[in-house]
Image (cartoon, grey):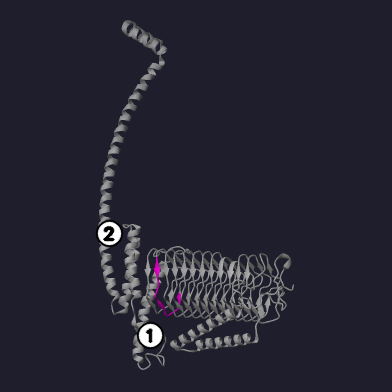
Amino acid sequence: MPEERKTIESRLSASPEVYRHTKFMARFEKAFPWLLAGGAALVLLETYRKNTNDRAKANADIKAALKNQEHQAEVLKEQIRQFDENAFKERKAERRERYTKAVEQLGNVSAPVRMGGVYTLIGLADEWLEEENLSEPEKVREGQVIVNNLCAYIRSPFILASHYDELSQASPTPEGFYKDNQQKFYTDKAEFTSEADIRLSIIQEIHDRLQSPDKNTPGTWSGFEYDFSGSTFFYPIDLTNSYYKKPVNFSGSTYQDEVRFDGSVYKDEADFGSSIYKSWATFDGSTYTGWVGFNCSTYQSWADFSASTYQNGATFMSSTYQSWADFSNSTCQSEVYFSDSTYKGKADFSGSTYQNEVYFSYSTYQSEADFSDSIYQDKADFSDSTYRGWADFRNSAYQGRAGFTDSTYQGEVYFNNSTYQWAHFSGSTYRGWADFRNSTYQGRAGFTDSIYQNEVYFSGSTYEDKANFSGSIFCGDVYYGKDRYNSNFSRFTECTPQFYNENSHQNTLFGSPDNDFSVENGRGYPIYRNLDGLPLGCAFLTAEQKEYLTDKFQEIDETKNKIREVKDPKEKAELSKKLQALNEKLYEWREEATTVKAEDTAPEEEDN
């Protein structure tokens, strides 16, 4: 090693330039070691610059590729749009063709062909509703055309429907249309059954699409209008729990078989008026957001409208119910009309709430009538009505005007345990006993110009305003104090009750001496009485007056019985006119009998 070193040093010493350079590098390395390392950094920097440029080029290439890809996507999207448009045009044309053929099939003489046309139309309606290339209004418009055709088929006349009673039997009836032609019976029955199946299928398919799995929610076909007006349904109808967003029309229809509309929701107008229901009909548990009409209809069997809500007006006027009519537990938020109707079976309106005006006037109830446990927040009109069975108005609240005037109650009637804001019972006839006990009259109470043939109970009631009984005839016992049922005394807090009208000179007549006119004098006004124990200005019925009333009531009853028995419409109409004349004559006689003549003495002073 020493020798080699020496050799090197000798060589360097032989070259001064090399020697000086070597020496310089040695000193430079020793002084600035970091600078030599910077050379490597410069290499790295150059490498980074080169890589950055590569990346920029790559990004540019990517952007160019993406732009080209977006262009290709737009081209593809446009191609797809054009394809879909062309495909929709093809579907539309194909559906139009199927629609035309299906409509033609509905008029075919073959029942299977007609049934095929029905299901084609139903399928087309479903397809239109599922079409993605149409807006919602366009979908409904296309489907509505098909629904109109289905409704028109239901409305179309079917001659054999007129023989429903016989063709619905297994064999011809002895006195029927087919009694002498059994072969035609079975031929017509087959055609009758086939047509009923077709129409029933339409109703069933519509019904399936008017409801959803969730109760009271719309189905796929709830957005259509339905017009079944003037139809004859010679097959059972089940449209329970249906939901209608648009108007529905069943007016002028005849239902030969049972029909169910219960549990349904009607968001727009619904018209069931001028119809005939020959079997039972149920509308219970339904909600009517729009106006609904049931007027001028006949129900030959049970009719159930209970537990329903009417939000925007309802009319049941001029209708006839030949069996039980149930309107109980209903809520009427707007005006409702039941006037000019006849109930041959029980009429049940109990437990209902009327938030607006309600009219029951000019009606006839041939059996029980139950209006109990109800709330009337506005005017309630029961005037000019006839109740042949018992009538129950008890446990009710009348917050507006309540009118019961000019009515006839042939059986027992109950007005007890109720609250009245303003009540008029004037001009009425009560053949059975009348119960007005334990009630509160916050406004005026009128019982004038009436005839009470039996017992009358006013006990336990409070009269906070004027109470007028003048011009009336009480044939039986009258109780204002404690009666046979141990009721409390009545109380007149505003003024003494009126039994004699000084303006019209009308008094009140009583047929029984066993009356109780005792009232709570300490907290109200007394009933001032004469020497006969009657209110001042009043008198007992004479024997002639009692006889007249007995004979007149007997004549009225006989006429009513004849009306129920006769079949001939003309004879029935004549008897009705006679009955009206008898009642008018009785009213005129009552007015004359209770009018005090000028020469008569003035009312006596009270004796107690």
Q: Position of residue 169 (x, y in %)?
A: 42, 86
What is the tally of numbered marks visible in this picture? 2
Measured from the top left, where is residue 553 in percent x and y? 58, 85
Q: Disc number at residue 163?
A: 1
The numbered mark at residue 88 is 2
> In the displayed structure, does residue 23 sit left or right of residue 317?
left
Please give left or right for residue 246 compared with residue 68 in the image: right
Q: Amino acid at mark 1?
A: His
Q: Residue at coordinates 37% horizontally, 22% vertically from top-left?
A: 41
Q: Which residues are magenta?
A: 247-259
Asked if residue 253 lies in the magenta stretch, the reply is: yes
Q: Amino acid at mark 2?
A: Phe
- Taking depth in this image into account, of 207 and 282 the one nearest to the observer is 282
Q: Tag 1, which secondary structure?
A: helix
- The answer to whether 169 is drawn above or below residue 58 in the figure is below
Point out the tag, 1 or 2, that comes first from the N-terminus: 2
Q: Is residue 159 above or below residue 18?
A: below
Q: Nearer the viewer, residue 98 or 428?
A: 428
